[in-house]
Amino acid sequence: MTASGNRLPAQGPQSVRRRRLRLRWVLLVSAIVVAALVSWSWYVGVQIRYYASMDQAAAADAIVVFGAAEYDGKPSPVFRARLDHAHDLFDRHIAPLIVTLGGPGGDEYTEGGVGQDYLMGAGVPESAIIAETESTSTSQSVERLAVIARTNHLRRLVVVSDAMHMFRIHAICAANGLDVLTSPRPRIETTEEGSRSSDPMWHEILTYTLWRVHLD
C-alpha cells in the first residue's frame, strides 16, 4: 500500500507479456553477440596458429626484424632470438639486406639501433643493414617499413618476429601494400626474467581485433 492506504495498481497480463518479450529479445541478442565473438575468436585463432606453424622464408629483397625489448643497449633474449634468426637467413642468402625496426626502448637506445649494433657485432656488414628507429608500435613499424621499401625499391620482404605475431604482422603489411613472407624466430620457453617469451593467444586475438576496427 501507499502512504495514503491505496493499493499500487497490479500489472495486467499484457504488461507481463511485454516484459517477457523484451527479456527474450535481450537474451536472443546477447546470445547472437556471444556466438559472433566466439566464432570470430575461433577464426582468428586458427589463422594465428596457421602462420605460427609455417616458415615461408624464400628469396627476397630484404629480411625485416620487428623490434622487441632492449636493456641498456643490449637485446633481450626474445629480441636476440629474432636477430639471430635474421642473421641465419642472411647467411643462407635469403636476402642481401636486413632492416631492423623499433624506436625508443625507454632509455637512450632504440630497438632498431640496438638490432643494428648486434648484427654488426655478429659480422653483418653495416652496408647490409637499415635501422628504423622511430616507430613505437607494430602498425607504426609497418608504416615506416613501407616508406623504406618504396625508397629502396624493395619489392619482396621476409619478416621475422615471434610465431604468434606472424598473422597480425602479415595482415598489417598487406594493408600497407607490402609483399611479405613470414619466418618466425625459433621458440624460447622463457626469458631471463622467467616469464613467457611470447604473448598469449588471447592477447594476439584482441590486438588483431582492435587493429581491424581501427582502435589500436
Image (cartoon, helix red, strand yellow):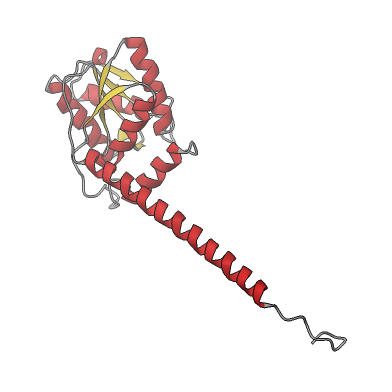
Residue 14 visible here: yes
Q: Quadrant for residue 6, please give it.
A: bottom right
In this view, the residue in front, 184 or 119, is 184
- 43 vs 103, left or right, is left
Q: Position of residue 32 (x, y in %)?
A: 45, 56
Q: Residue at x 34, y 32 (%)?
A: 171
Q: Quadrant for residue 110, please give it.
A: top left
Q: Residue at x 35, y 51 (%)?
A: 39
Task: Report the residue that reaches farthest toward the bottom.
Answer: 5
In this view, the residue in front, 70 or 210, is 210
Q: Looking at the picture, does residue 22 appear above or below residue 13?
A: above
- 158 vs 36, left or right, is left
Task: Report the residue that reaches farthest toward the right.
Answer: 4
Q: Position of residue 28 (x, y in %)?
A: 49, 61
Q: Position of residue 198 (x, y in %)?
A: 29, 45
**Quarter of the figure that contains the N terminus:** bottom right
Residue 117 visible here: no
Task: Report the residue that reaches farthest toward the front.
Answer: 14
Q: Position of residue 132 (x, y in %)?
A: 37, 22
Q: Residue at x 31, y 31 (%)?
A: 170
